[in-house]
Image: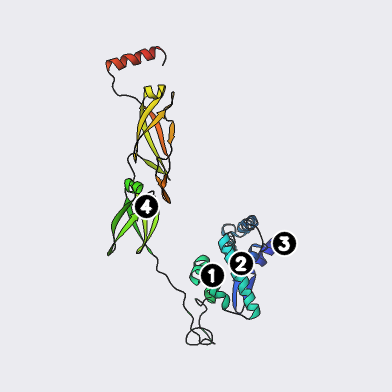
Amino acid sequence: MDARAAKASTATRNYYTLRGMSFTDYYRVLGIEKGASEAEIKKAFRSLAREYHPDANPNNPQAEEKFKEISEAYEVLSDPQKRAKYDHISSQYQASQRTGGRGAWQQQYNPQDLGDMFGGTSFGDLLSQLFGGGAGGGAGRGAGGGPGGRRTRPTPQHEPEQVYAVTISFEEAFAGATKRLALGNRKIDVSFKPGIASGQRLKIPAGFLEVTIAPHARYMRDGDHLKVSEHVPVSTMVLGGSIPVQTPSGQVQITVPPGTPSGRTLRVRGQGMPVYRDPSSRGDLYVTLYVHVPSSLSDEQRGLFEQLRSTGI
C-alpha cells in the first residue's frame, strides 16, 4: 500500500473517543488539515471518492464503508454553515471533557436545529447522545433516564406543517387581491401582494400556502418583467411610426424606428409586473414586433404593392 493510500486508510479509522462517546474526525477522514480551503476539501474528496467508490471496488465491503465516511465528511465540511457549527461544537465539547465540565455549553444550542443540520451523520448521532436523544439506558441511570436519576428533557418533535395550494389569476397577481379560502375545516382570508409569483409560499396559521399564477393569454412573465408580441403594419415597420400597446395597467404609445425588422424586441421601461417587495416599482415590458401580412387587399392596396414590387421592394 502506498503512502497516500495508507494515510487515507488511517484517516477513515481515526476517531475521537470522549467518555464513551465517539465521532469521526472529518478532517482526518479526508486527510486534510483543519484550516483547509474549500478547494483543498473538494480535491481530497474527489481523490478518495475515486479510490473507494463501490463501482471501483465491487467485491470490497470495506471500501463501501470508507466511501460512506468520505461522503459524510465532505457533506459537512463543504457546507460553510455546517462546517462552522461542527468546528465550534466539537472544539467546545472536547474542551469541556478535558476539564470535566458538562452541560453548560449545550445550553446555547437548539437540539432540534442541530439534529436537522447533521441528521444522518455520525456527528448527528453524537449530538443525539449529548442532548439526551439516544444515549440509552443502563447502569448508573435512575428512573428518569438521566445520569444519577435526573430526568432528561426529550428532544421536541415537530409535526410537518401542511402545505396548501392555491391558483390566482394574472390580474390578481398584478394588482394584488384578498381571497377567502377554505382550508380543511376552516376558512381564512389571505392577502396576496402585487407582484407575487408562482411557487411562492405564504405562511398562514394552518401551515403554508403555495401560490400558482394562472397563465395569461397575452402576457408572458419573466420575473418582474413581461413579454408580449405585437403585429405591426408593414408600412410602419419600413417607415417608422408610433403604435399603441396595451399593458396590464393601460395603453401606451411606443415608437417603432424606421427599418425595423420583424422579430425585433423593444423595451418599455416600468410597464412590467410590480416588484413584490416594493410594489411602487415595476419591471419592464418587452414588446416583440412582427410584420402584419394582410390576408386580403383592396384593389388600391394591391396596386400600390405592385408598384413597390416593380421598384424592387
- For disc 4, the marked residue is 193
Q: Position of residue 241 (x, y in %)?
A: 39, 25
Badge 4 amino acid: Lys
229 horizontally vs 55: left or right:
left
Up the image or down, 9 lies above or below 149; here it is: above
Q: Mark 4 or mark 2: which comes first in sequence?
A: 2
- For disc 2, the marked residue is 87
Q: Mark 2 or mark 1: which comes first in sequence?
A: 2
Q: CA distance from mark 4 to mark 2?
A: 42 Å
> What residue is at 56 percent from the left and 62 percent from the top?
81
- For disc 3, the marked residue is 3
Q: Position of residue 38 (x, y in %)?
A: 62, 56
- Secondary structure under the numbered disc 3 in the rendered image: helix
Do the numbered discs 4 and 2 sit on residues whose CB atoms are within 8 Å? no
Asked if residue 15 shows in the view, the reply is: yes
Badge 3 amino acid: Ala
Viewer-nearest of discs 4 and 2: 4
How many residues crowd mark 3 within 10 Å: few (<14), some (14–19), many (20+)?
few
Q: Mark 1 or mark 4: which comes first in sequence?
A: 1
Q: CA distance from mark 1 to mark 4?
A: 40 Å
Name the quadrant containing residue 28.
bottom right
Up the image or down, 48 lies above or below 99; here it is: above
Badge 2 amino acid: Asp
Do the numbered discs 1 and 4 sit on residues whose CB atoms are within 8 Å? no
Badge 1 amino acid: Gly
Q: Position of residue 235 (x, y in %)?
A: 37, 22
Of residue 301 and residue 190, the one placed in the foreground of this image is 190
Q: Mark 3 or mark 1: which comes first in sequence?
A: 3
- For disc 1, the marked residue is 124
